[in-house]
Image (cartoon, grey):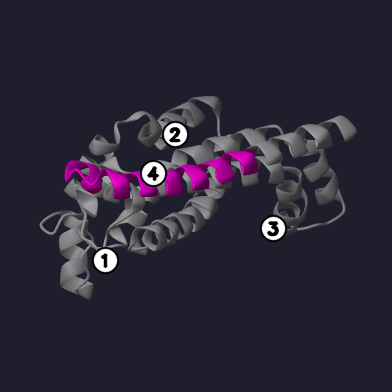
Amino acid sequence: MDWYPLFNSLRVAGISCVIVFFAGIFAAYYVAKMPKLLKGVLDVVLTLPLVLPPTVVGYFLLRLMGPNRPLGAWMARMFDIRLTMVWYSAVFTSAVVAFPLMYRTARGAFESFDENLAWSAQTLGLSNPYIFWRIRMPCCRQGILAGTVLAFARALGEYGATSMVAGYIPGRTATISTTVYQLWRTDNDAQAARWVMVNVAISLVVLLAVNFLEKGQKYRRRRG
């Protein structure tokens, strides 16, 4: 059994999760502080990939990153780098699809934060970066961690956009999701079932982690 799809899926999900973690926190923190009207507009735009069909997301990404499209042509001309049909293409697509989960969860955590703690810290002369990383983030850590886990799971299971932008090339761009489809399409049910069980096992671990984080958050609220 070729384990490359598992390795590539974990690699893609891990890298995209790191990107989404910082991008989601940054967007959630600043959007939560914006006026209501502007917040509503940005919220719709940033959450759109969550409700669009993955193939539509893949179509838009191809319009942007294709070899003859603006970003794809510029990257190829300047750095001789392709943005489609390579393994890291799946990183871009997974990050775009998983971003709304991290953003929405982090924004909810930031909006529930007691701003009196930040104001009190400011009166003590503490810097904003210190307040953010040492006060705000620890208070919101349960929501942040839950969003991170959900984003990782979404990136790991992404198929529609990934199949359009990265394709299925065994040993190069294959992921668990694209491998299952290809094996099913070629009537290789036994191998497809094995990969399905691998994906189910990973998903169960992710769900258990989310439940554990949610219980920890409820316990912390009761103690607080």
As drawn, 168 above or below 27 = below
**Quadrant for the C terminus in the image:** top right
What SS does tag 2 mark?
Answer: helix
* Nearer to us in this view, 146 or 62: 146
Q: Quadrant of residue 73?
A: bottom left
What SS does tag 3 mark?
Answer: helix
| Residues under numbered marks 2 and 4 in contact, where contact means CB atoms less than 8 Å apart | no
**C-alpha distance separating marks 2 and 4:** 37 Å
Q: Which mark is residue 42?
A: 2
What SS does tag 1 mark?
Answer: loop
In the image, what residue type sits under mark 4? Answer: Val
Residue at 21%, 54% (x, y): give it: 168
Residue at 83%, 56% (x, y): give it: 125
- Label whose residue precedes the other's in the sequence (2 or 4): 2
- Label whose residue precedes the other's in the sequence (3 or 4): 3
Q: Residues within 10 Å of mark 1 (few under 14, many from 20)?
A: few
Comparing marks 2 and 1, which lies closer to the viewer? 1
Comparing marks 3 and 4, which lies closer to the viewer? 4
Picture coordinates of residue 169 (x, y %)? 20, 60
As drawn, 48 above or below 90 = above
**C-alpha distance separating marks 3 and 1:** 43 Å
Q: Which mark is residue 196?
A: 4
**C-alpha distance separating marks 1 and 4:** 19 Å
Residue at 49%, 25% (x, y): give it: 37
Q: Which mark is residue 129?
A: 3
In the image, what residue type sits under mark 1? Answer: Gly
Quick check: can you spot residue 155? no
